[in-house]
Image: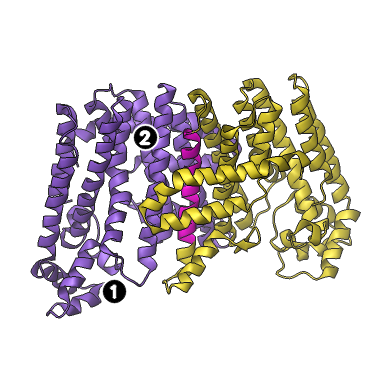
Chain colours: A purple, B yellow
Amino acid sequence: MIAELAVHRQPIVDALRDIDAGLGDELADVNRWGHDLRVRMLEFAQRGKLIRGSLVAASAAAFGRPVDGAVYTVAAAVELVQSFLLIHDDIMDEDPLRRGSPAVFEQYRRYGSDHGFRHRRRFGESMAICAGDVAILVVFAAISSIEIEESTRVRLMSLLAREIAKVGVAQMADVANGHDPAPATEDEIVSVYQFKTGRYTFSLPLMLGAILAGTDAMVVDALCRWGDLQGVVFQIRDDQLGIMGDADQTGKPVGSDIMANKQTLHRLTLFEAIAGTEWEDVRACFGRDQLSPDEIGRVRRALEQTGTIALLDRRIAQLRSDSAREIAGIGLGDAPRRLLDAIDAYNAARDV
Amino acid sequence: MIAELAVHRQPIVDALRDIDAGLGDELADVNRWGHDLRVRMLEFAQRGKLIRGSLVAASAAAFGRPVDGAVYTVAAAVELVQSFLLIHDDIMDEDPLRRGSPAVFEQYRRYGSDHGFRHRRRFGESMAICAGDVAILVVFAAISSIEIEESTRVRLMSLLAREIAKVGVAQMADVANGHDPAPATEDEIVSVYQFKTGRYTFSLPLMLGAILAGTDAMVVDALCRWGDLQGVVFQIRDDQLGIMGDADQTGKPVGSDIMANKQTLHRLTLFEAIAGTEWEDVRACFGRDQLSPDEIGRVRRALEQTGTIALLDRRIAQLRSDSAREIAGIGLGDAPRRLLDAIDAYNAARDV
């Protein structure tokens, strides 16, 4: 990831522990499940890459705010937002693994199994719905008690609530795209990329940092538009690495999106390009339970030889130049410009 | 319900519509699911009895605050908290009916069915997880933009976040009690009553209203303890009506808690009392798929003749006198005292 973010990791972990120390006792006082949950929640949040939280801190610093405990509390809260979303996403995707360990619903399912509970799967999913719910409430409890001026606290909570609500709506479209046999349109796919990846991975952390630094609303709005476009770049690269990348480097099994038949821009563009060509049989690889290395190789060659990869690379170049235009006239200082340039360069070139 | 609450119903519905008008467009702008959700969310929230929201308004008025738009926005937000909790609860309980209409997960399942979606049940549940998530985020977005002083907004959001987090933890215990073959202890059952029913139905609305009126923290804390105890009274009465009440009056099928084998204080007390008596076979009625009118009659007689009903009636009397003690020394004015007396009388005597 972006080198200058690494310095924020340990302080964010410390802030997560402080939030747990401050609110965890209240949860543990309700019943034994409150105690159990605080342990799982802290462990889950710490195990992430903490990129979004680090971006909050990097943005605050770039816009001239001392990176103090208040900033790291917001950064940690953003990581708990991530926990909330992932805990619920894993239920929807029925994905028992997350960050190399059992997903939260799977942790509870196993607990139910170990203790002779009835209907363990339902138990696991129900407990994980509650766990995600508690995580997002802890986010607002934590931010409401940060020692900064009240107007800033209100601004942060208002932004978080509105933007994460939109992430939830984008997630609905993502769920629907996975169940609807009709193909999603290009606009529908890009909208999921923008709101589920862009708004939440880039725009929101950058905006929160800028607000902590007391930055003008005009600049904050430009950061939102910039982050949305960069998020689409990030997601297109992510989809591409999932097919063309090296599993050892990405840590993700090659072709998993093809087997899941995920509605990506690559899939949509490829399907349009292969009609009536020698590659038409490649379509049948999508949604298959198993793919041989030969089949994956054939999909890769189809993506190259139909010009799908080249077309999406041009699209990435266009999105990057669009994003540059969004921040051209707003008089950004050197430090924020360096941060955005580093993110832009990373998104364009990353191979893991 | 309590007569003086009815006056608040229409203004809360109007406030729900205002929240929808203010935030719904933002959701609808994300994608078509955002539009679909705002319609379902508003319809769902309006269909409730709006008791909790009405209590917010009644409490604010009793503590001397003019009941204006700000108060009704908080009241409407509390109703959206209720929507959030019920939408998720219905998934966990697999209960396809809510408020006489399809539960939200069932609405989406049917949508999936009507549109030829794959895995409709999973689709319905996933969409309902998202819908509940969006509802709780709309709560914080709505309160963060109320036009009252910022310190009050922060206090309201902090209280809501902390207390609803505890409701989530109590819900975890309720879920676990439904799956664990080992019986819950009396303390565990009462803790669910206190945090899931009391804190959220009585304490929280009363506290929010008092905070809106600028009431002292000492009084707000006493309201919390009073509401917790009254909540336990309410829930014991609710359980009792579910077995002993008249289905035509309660609107709930008689004996549904017995068939669901719900871990209530009645069940726990009865099971302790029937050991070695002529009523021992009554135990086998709990958890049965079907119960005849004769079997329900036999459970009712066992509850009467083992002294279970009398014991729990004494417990209700004790809880009411404990709750009175919590507010005895805090110098409550006439208006708040009248409101609390009305709630207490209702909880003690209600037969629907």
Residue B338 in sight in this render: yes
Left/right placement of residue A276 relative to residue B86 reads: left
For mark 2, give the secondary structure. helix
* Kind of residue at disc 1: Arg
Left/right placement of residue B265 relative to residue A293 reads: right
Give the image location of residue B216, x and y in percent.
Answer: 64, 20
Residue A288 badge:
1
Q: Is residue A337 above or below residue B83?
A: above
Instruction: Tell me the CA gap for discs 1 and 2.
Output: 39 Å
Give the image location of residue A148, x and y in percent.
Answer: 40, 22
Residue A76 badge:
2
Furthest-right residue in this view: B305
Q: Is residue B131 magenta?
A: yes
Quarter of the image for the N terminus of chain B: give it.
top right
- The segment highlighted magenta reads B125-145
Q: Residues within 10 Å of mark 1 (few under 14, many from 20)?
A: few
Q: Residues within 10 Å of mark 2 (few under 14, many from 20)?
A: many
Q: Is residue A217 above or below residue B115?
A: above
Please name the residue shown 86% across and 41% down the image. Answer: B314
Q: Chain of mark 1?
A: A
Give the image location of residue A82, x and y in percent.
Answer: 37, 44
Our reading of the magenta stretch's main secondary structure is helix
* Kind of residue at disc 2: Ala
Q: Is residue A144 magenta?
A: no
Mark 1 or mark 2, earlier in chain: 2
Give the image location of residue A285, x and y in percent.
Answer: 23, 74
Residue A54 in sight in this render: no
Please name the residue shown 30% across and 55% down the image. Answer: A191
